[in-house]
Image: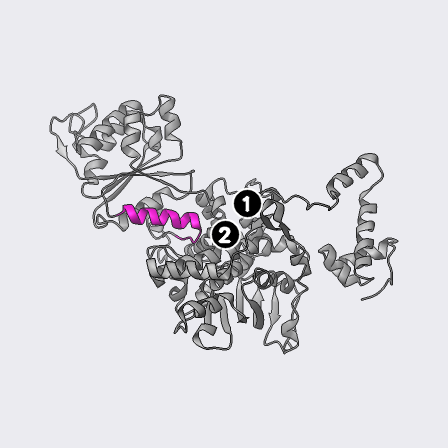
Amino acid sequence: MDTGQKSTQDKGIRLLRPSAHDKHRLPDIDDLAARLRFVPAKGEVWFDDRRMVLLHNTSLGAIRRELIETVGIEKARGLITRMGYQSGARDAEMVRRIRPDSNDFDSFAVGPQMHALEGFVSVETLALDVDVETGHFYGEFIWRNSAEAEQHLATFGDSNTPVCWLQQGYANGYLSSFLGRQMLVREVECKAMGAPACKIVGKALDQWDDPDADFRYLQAQDFVQSPSSKKFSFPRSDSSTTEISDKIDLVGVSSGFNTVCHMIQRVAPTRATVLFLGESGVGKEQFARTLHNISDRAEQPFIAINCAAIPEQLIESELFGVEKGGFSGASQSRPGRFERADGGTLFLDEIGTLSLVAQGKLLRALQEGEIERIGDTRVRKVDVRVVAATNENLRDLVEAGKFRDDLFYRLNVFPVNIPPLRERKEDILLLVEHFLNRYCALHKRKVTGFTEAALEALLFYSWPGNIRELENLIERGVILAPEDGGIDISHLFTSGENIRREPARMEAAASPPEQPAGVPNLSAQLREALASGKLSLDSLEEDAIGQALHLAQGNVSGAAKILGTTRARVAYRLSGRKVAHPAEGKE
């Protein structure tokens, strides 16, 4: 392909080593600027339906300095990088809404242009090679006029390492969300180091030789794994479910995920009882295993029991054990879960399903640190750390008389609430790649990646079954996808899942900005015209195209940009209808 040319084919962009002229060929930014609104009477700034704020760059520099001086440069860099990642991931969600019918290059340009619009940096493309379907990406970019480097120089002077942490995080979040695969952007030159401008290189995470040197700043804790750092190998086709699940590590970068990691890091060295709360499938047992593995009990047993899976008449013997002859059929003595977990951790899942009788006996074991086997008179001391989990509201169960209040307060020493997957959107792509690697190895399949439709569906699906459902869908996709092909939406959602995208979920708590004073209320006028029967969809479309052409002085491409659509679509409408506009036929 010729240097500086870009392909607008569905499978990707090819823009390699553009010429001096080509590097300025980004689409017009007017469609983005038009979505920016200031409502000073209410103290609000909006971009589309998302509330924004304006801050002095010196204020960001002051926060940066205080973070470095209080928590150290490593932790400060991690916090600032993760903040940028969240912003980039959020901006990537808007791409298909802002430029729904644009080619890949114009859609991709939303990120660099948003970053410029937000006042951080001016982006210049040096090399770009993208294939959305396979997740392939290679890019080289120049950051000119970096606000972050400028403030770092003013505060600290010259640096011997790159300092554009917020911008690097933004680029990582935007690229990863845009392509549906975890990317890693690395700043290789920085103005704060004496370079004339900052330069970054972006590639897929697994294409770097040492990704953790930068990716670790996206993870709040060292025990969290990146998808590429864990290589799955299943040499035996009869690998058990237990062996496979033992290989799964915590994966995530979202603020909700990192908060949970911070909390278990704090409580791990203690003896405190921990109560994990959250919907079914959010990974409570995996977090409990991690808590055990990073504690000083890591070399001792981790024993898990699902209280909902044990019949009520057997739960006592399962927990505390039984002596030979303790009840009819007890032909030999058997230790219970408490004894087996002695010195380690006992995980009680679905604890809200225990009967009141079992709850009373569990409370005594927790308070006294001793148990009695059924049919035995001997009291046995046990050193067990109890970690419980439930997807029910225990306070409601207490009020309903279904759960003992004294046991609730004994368990509720250190509650940890795990957010559902729909509130951890930044984690979806990491988990998708994690499970894709795992099940490709398990089932010995070669799958190239995901189609754009599949990625969009994965990102906007509500995930009622949380991570467990995501894992099942990825395994299903790996099995159904063609060899050496991509996973499409038809390979994933085959069991009646509702994948309808709801625009109302774009921003949970945001209220749309009101019309500024003096601006006509177009929605009210539109309702009146529709109610009176004076307006139809055809006439509305013709009028909109005509007005756009008038504003663009008859330029069809300009009208398409005003309308937020493609030139081909406007031209198609013009070919089939009589639309009054000046200078028809201009390019």
Left or right position of 93 against 294: right
Residue at horizontal 82%, vertical 42%?
536
User: Where is mark 2, residue-wise?
Assistant: 479
Q: Check the image and name the residue furthest to the top.
A: 401
Quadrant placement of the C terminus:
bottom right
Which amino acid type corresponds to the residue marked 1 in the rendered image?
A: Tyr
Residue at horizontal 27%, vertical 27%?
406
In the depicted structure, whether residue 120 falls above or below residue 157: above
User: Of residues 541 and 429, which is closer to you in this image?
Assistant: 541
Q: Residues within 10 Å of mark 1 (few under 14, many from 20)?
A: some
Which amino acid type corresponds to the residue marked 2 in the rendered image?
A: Ile
| Number of numbered markers | 2
- Label 2 secondary element: helix
Measured as percent of width and height from the top left, residue 484 is found at 53, 61
**Was residue 551 drawn as part of the magenta stretch in this picture?**
no
User: Of residues 105 and 347, which is closer to you in this image?
Assistant: 105
Residue at horizontal 17%, vertical 25%?
326
Mark 2 touches mark 1? (CB < 8 Å): no
User: Where is mark 1, residue-wise?
Assistant: 461
* Secondary structure mostly taken by the magenta-highlighted segment of the chain: helix
Q: Nearer the viewer, mark 2 or mark 1?
A: 1
**Was residue 259 drawn as part of the magenta stretch in this picture?**
yes
In the depicted structure, whether residue 12 falls above or below residue 265: below
Left or right position of 261 against 365: right
Query: Which one is earlier in the sequence, the residue at label 2 or at label 1?
Result: 1
Q: Is residue 447 visible?
A: no
Quadrant placement of the N terminus:
bottom right
Q: How far apart are the two marked residues, 2 and 1, measured between alpha carbons?
A: 21 Å
Measured as percent of width and height from the top left, residue 231 is found at 38, 60
Bounds of the magenta span? Answer: 251-268
